[in-house]
Image (spheres, rainbow, N blue to C red):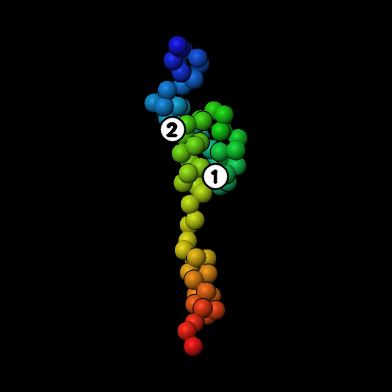
Amino acid sequence: MPTAQEQGQLSIKEEFGSYITTTSQVDANVLTFWELECARFPMIYRIAMDYLLVQPSSVPCEHIFSSSTETNTKK
């Protein structure tokens, strides 16, 4: 069975090396960057999507819990 490298895919070390040397505009939208580069860096893209999908703030969650307290009070 051929390895990933034999099939033309980069190893993670090669992919990371290529990614590190990639230049992008400072004001570039990170989601747009990954949309354009997902085929070039497929392994790093999957990792990036795991982190980019994390909610950056707990404020919306806190708001939901606060409003649920108001509706579920003991009388």
State the residue in front, 35 or 49: 49
Q: Residue sitting at 60 percent across and 38 percent down? A: 35
State the image coordinates of residue 49 (x, y, percent, origin top left): 51, 42
Query: Can residue 21 be spotted in the picture?
Result: no
- What amino acid is at disc 1? Val
12 w.r.t. 63: above or below: above
57 w.r.t. 28: above or below: below
State the image coordinates of residue 3 (x, y, percent, origin top left): 44, 15
Element on which disc 2 rests = helix
Q: Are marks 1 and 2 in contact (CB under 8 Å)?
A: no
| Neighbours of disc 1 within 10 Å: few (<14), some (14-19), many (20+) | few
Query: Can residue 8 be spotted in the picture?
Result: yes
Residue at image mark 2: 20
Element on which disc 1 rests = helix
Report how many numbered discs are placed on residues in the image.
Answer: 2
Q: Residue sitting at 45 percent across and 11 percent down? A: 1
- What amino acid is at disc 2? Ile
Q: Residue sitting at 48 percent across and 52 percent down? A: 54
Residue at image mark 1: 30
Single out the residue that lies furthest toward the bottom. 75
State the residue in front, 23 or 18: 18
State the image coordinates of residue 12 (x, y, percent, origin top left): 41, 27
